Image: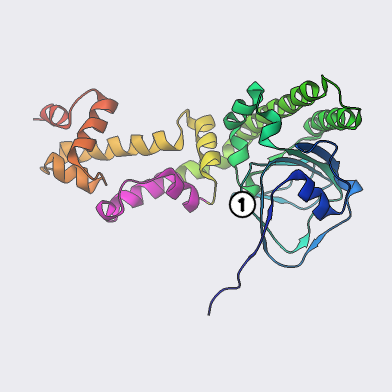
């Protein structure tokens, strides 16, 4: 039996989003800020795939429900921040669309185009995180963030002059800088919880290389993240904080470990080892091995003879 198709809604402009919410047009076509308590509550009756052509930064307050982070539940009941990049797909479950209070910041990429922040947006990895990897704020952090939202809101309501965009973008960058700081704190605070993540990662990689890896090719970050129910960017950022290595570097470390095992403990040829590890060509394996160890596979093997 074919599953029910998910309803899809694409919001092409900030003006269209205001229209969908039943509110007046934005004061600027490429930017707006909304207080959630000023919006009429919208009830979603079916699972909906939602996409926007612009960035959104959302602060949800008074969220008494526990928040699921990966496969773990956390009982923070302070502010929750979420970040959405243009074209990012969000699945909205049935129920109320908004919490009781909070803020929504809408930023079209063209609003940032002539500013350094336009390029810097790519450096804020949290725009690629999944919804269940939201930033959970402490009470003090929530207050700091809300102060910036209030400052942005105040500037947004003023008459536009030659400095309006400069001031708004300066405050947006400050908000994102604080978000970076608080995510880093979140990674540190939850290090004990992520110990299990490291164990699962090792188990996943070991299992991958034990079962017909030659048929599947090299393991990917996407595969690991999906298996761990995390986004690729979030997984890499967590691992970088915990171990100093990204997810891709963990894969490379495991590849070298397995290659050394086969070169030192088996009589398999370099070509056979390359295919067993998922490389399409032996030359690719030899180049990779030399880059990581400063030796060729045969030079490494010779050290055990």
Residue 98 appears in the rendering: no
Crowd class of label 1 (few under 14; some 14 to 19; many from 20; radius 10 Å): some
The residue furthest top is 163
Position in image of residue 90 (x %, y %): 65, 53
Q: Is residue 201 magenta?
A: yes
Residue 249 appears in the rendering: yes
Q: Residue at x 75, y 37 (%)?
A: 30
In the shown orientation, is residue 298 left or right of residue 88? left
Q: Which residues are magenta?
A: 200-228
Q: Return the residue nearer the eye: 225 or 84.
A: 84
Occupied quadrant, residue 252 = top left
As displayed, is residue 285 above or below residue 204?
Answer: above
Q: Return the residue nearer the eye: 53 or 104.
A: 53
Position in image of residue 95 (x %, y %): 77, 62
* Residue marked by disc 1: 89
Position in image of residue 305 (x %, y %): 8, 30
Magenta: main secondary structure equals helix
Q: Return the residue nearer the eye: 120 or 175.
A: 120
Q: Is residue 241 magenta?
A: no
Q: Residue at x 85, y 44 (%)?
A: 25
Position in image of residue 2 (x %, y %): 54, 76
Q: Return the residue nearer the eye: 31 or 125.
A: 31
Considering the numbered disc 1 on the image, is that residue within a helix, a strand or a loop? loop
Q: Residue at x 86, y 46 (%)?
A: 36
The residue furthest left is 305
In the shown orientation, is residue 229 left or right of residue 43? left
């Amino acid at each position: 039996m074919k599953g029910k198709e998910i309803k899809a809604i694409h919001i092409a402009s900030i003006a269209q989003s205001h229209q969908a919410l039943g509110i007046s047009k934005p004061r600027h076509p490429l930017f707006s800020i909304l207080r959630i308590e000023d919006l009429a509550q919208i009830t979603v009756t079916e699972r909906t795939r939602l996409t926007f052509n612009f960035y959104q930064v959302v602060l949800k307050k008074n969220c008494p429900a526990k928040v699921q982070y990966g496969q773990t539940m956390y009982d923070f009941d302070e502010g929750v921040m979420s970040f959405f990049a243009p074209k990012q797909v969000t699945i909205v479950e049935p129920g109320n669309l908004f919490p009781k209070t909070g803020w929504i910041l809408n930023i079209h990429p063209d609003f940032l185009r002539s500013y350094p922040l336009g390029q810097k947006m790519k450096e804020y990895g949290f725009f690629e995180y999944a919804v269940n990897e939201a930033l959970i704020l402490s009470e003090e952090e929530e207050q700091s963030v809300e102060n910036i939202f209030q400052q942005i809101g105040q500037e947004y309501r003023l008459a536009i002059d030659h400095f309006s965009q400069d001031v708004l973008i300066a405050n947006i960058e400050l908000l994102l800088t604080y978000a970076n700081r608080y995510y880093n704190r979140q990674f540190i605070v939850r290090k004990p919880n992520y110990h299990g993540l490291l164990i699962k990662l090792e188990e996943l990689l070991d299992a991958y290389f034990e079962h017909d890896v030659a048929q599947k090719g090299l393991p990917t970050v996407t595969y690991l993240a999906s298996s761990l129910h995390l986004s690729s960017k979030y997984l890499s950022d967590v691992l970088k904080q915990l171990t100093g290595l990204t997810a891709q570097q963990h894969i490379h470390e495991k590849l070298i470990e397995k290659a050394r095992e086969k070169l030192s403990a088996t009589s398999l040829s370099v070509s056979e080892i390359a295919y067993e590890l998922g490389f399409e060509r032996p030359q690719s394996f030899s180049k990779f091995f030399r880059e990581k160890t400063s030796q060729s596979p045969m030079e490494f093997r010779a050290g055990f003879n």
